[in-house]
Image: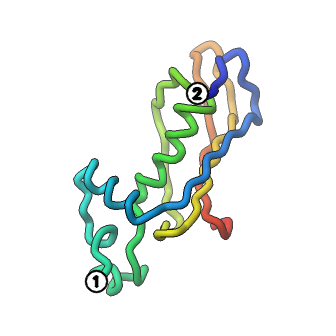
Amino acid sequence: MTGKRMDQLQVGDVAEFAKTVTETDIYLYAGITGDFNPAHVNEAYAKNTFFKTRIAHGMLTAGFISAIIANQLPGPGTIYMKQELSFLAPVRIGDTITARVEVLELLAEKNRVRLKTTCSNQDGV
């Protein structure tokens, strides 16, 4: 686990985390959160949806951003205060997702940082 103190951060600092999403990840997330939407956990159901297969929970993917914020940038001790999310494409089993966090603004007087966060798959989507 690494991280930076406020006085070490610079606009433009970037950190990334990549993970291949597995069926086990989806079932574990469903169990932890109680979100058993059949679009995530029931292949027979999911085949009849717009996506034609099971997809990962959007918040599972958003959790990859949280991993960066907690462990790398800014890092340990960071208090996550706000985030706005848009889910632009489904995440499927076997997709390798790269989460990216970039420092956009330093608000030293408030001890806060504004970040840009994105997740993309192996195809850049």
* Amino acid type shown at disc 2: Gly
Marks 1/2: CA distance?
41 Å
Q: Residue at x 68, y 30 (%)?
A: 105
What kind of element bears circle 2?
A: loop
Residue located beneath label 2 in the image: 75
User: How many numbered dots are placed on residues in this image?
Assistant: 2
Residue 18, percent across and down?
61, 52
Residue 116, percent across and down?
63, 43
Tell me if 80 is positioned left or right of 8 in this view.
Answer: left
Quadrant housing residue 74: top right
- Residue density around tag 2, few if under 14, some if 14–19, many if 20 or more, within 10 Å: some
Residue 97, percent across and down?
58, 59
Q: Residue at x 65, y 18 (%)?
A: 6
Q: Residue 44 — which label?
A: 1
Tell me if 91 is positioned left or right of 111 in this view.
Answer: left
* Residue in front for this viewpoint, 100 or 41: 41
**Location of residue 114 with respect to 111 vertically, above or below:** below
